Amino acid sequence: MTHYDVVVVGAGPVGLMLGCELGLGGVPRVLVVERLTEVDETIKAGAINIPTAVALDRRGFLPALVKVQQESMDRFRAFQRSRGGDGNAPPPPKFAGHFAGIMLDAALLDAADPAFADVGPAGDVGMVAQSSLEVMLAERAGELGVELRRGVELTGFEQDDDGVTVHLASVDGSAPESVRAGRLVGCDGGRSLVRKLAGFDFPGTPPEITGYQALAGLTGAEGLAGGWTATATGVYTHGPLPGRVLTVEFDGPPVDRTAPVTAEELQGSLRRVSGVDVTVTEVGTVTRFTDNCRQVTSYRAGRVLLAGDSAHVHSPFGGQGLNLGMGDAMNLGWKLAAVACGRAPESLLDSYTSERHPIGAWVLDWTRAQIALMRPESHARKLREVFTDMTHTVDGTTHLVKKISGVWQRYDLPGSHPLVGGSAPDLEFADGTRLADHLHGGRALLLDLRDDAELRAVAEGYGDRVDVRTAVCPGRPELSGLLVRPDGFTAWAEDRPGASAPAKPEAALTDALERWFGAPAGRP
């Protein structure tokens, strides 16, 4: 029986990102299986938020992201021209978005808010579609030696104290196969078979809506309003790409969520919600969705773990789903690699649930609140008017954009410095490099910003786990040192001591190194 250190089920962005992180972490035998035989071009997430863009920048993807965004802008301008515009729209606002289809005015954003500081050039990237992300991640996974097998699906598994026996089958009907894995990770979406077979608790709230998102050929579309529109029967949006439509109706979930969506079904929903006699002439890609909102109570059951939609499902409003899953992959990847390679104890995986579950719970509530504001009933519509008035203020817009952009996210980590627990600032150094440039290898980083041999000595014995760099950071002269985890979050930070205090490494650095990376080499 073939043995793998980790088997990942699902090759969407989350599964592929996890595969890349495991490869970077030195896990020698990683298998990612995917039922689909090629990248799914169905229209799904159309953008990434700041934590996702920053995470990808830290792995060297920034040039590719910039290229994809430019291609997206070209398509957006083509849509403008198709509606009689001049096709010379400026780039999208840096942190623009919407809440429940209420568009936010970037001119009202307080860009000087400290929450937006130090994200680096990745903060200018957003228009990256899910399918484009899958292509670049699959290529990187292959470069890292991760085995990706398409057209293969999970049929079952059994776990024991020593590992997991995973049963696979090719979708073409060829002979089934069983492999042995040290760990199994379900990244197989909202209907996750891994989650169901492992018996994870999955509490939440049932669906109330039926929604469609499609790229389709339309006639009569000139009668559709651009952007998001609330009507007496629901909510719809048209654009920002040619043929892109989304509808939401509040008459309950679909009878059969798995049935193929026909042109007639999509057309009926679009006509009912918009009141416009639109004809759907062809369907390019289409998805049907609901607001089923659930989250597992723990992201791990023994040797089986979950990430992405396998661990939490919700409506797509606010564009949080893809980004939430990418955060899961970044958090889990380095920890699972350390455990699989024997560099860390099993207990390190406990921090995966404790850090990611609160952020997932917030996303679920964020989407529930948007559903409440979109309902086509008198009380909800009046509440929507009140809420819209709030978005016309600097404080209201800035608050919502901080949430949408993800800059608020942090973990409850030990330490009193304000940087601890947050995504590390993208510091610029005197040699022209940025912090992100030093994280491409997926290892932890200890930054010595005061050229202190004592500080560097604290990290002796961690050479196989932590990179140590001495640098000068003119823009942050108060900082003395920074310990950045492989996922880019700050585990320890120290300011330069005052004139009356001697310069010495903090004991907190030793504690942080041992907490996240175990004992130094040569010490049990």
Image (spheres, rainbow, N blue to C red):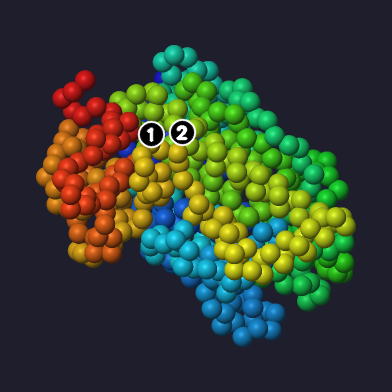
- In the image, taking residue 174 as reference, residue 23 lies left or right, namely left
Q: CA distance from mark 1 to mark 2?
A: 8 Å
Disc 2 marks a residue whose amino acid type is Tyr
The residue that label 1 is drawn on is: 335
62 with respect to 199 (left or right):
left
State the residue in front, 242 or 118. Answer: 118
Closer to the N terminus: mark 1 or mark 2? Answer: 1
Residue at which label 2 appears: 352
Residue at horizontal 24%, vertical 35%?
A: 507
Between 332 and 28, which is closer to the camera in this rendering? Answer: 332
In the image, is 16 to the left or to the right of 86? left
User: Nearest the camera: 309 or 493?
Assistant: 493
| Dots 1, 2 in contact, CB < 8 A | yes
Q: Which circle marks residue 390 in the picture? A: none
- Of residues 33 and 53, which is closer to you in this image? 53
Image quarter of the C terminus: top left
Q: Position of residue 415 (x, y in %)?
A: 36, 39
Percent x, y of residue 239: 68, 68
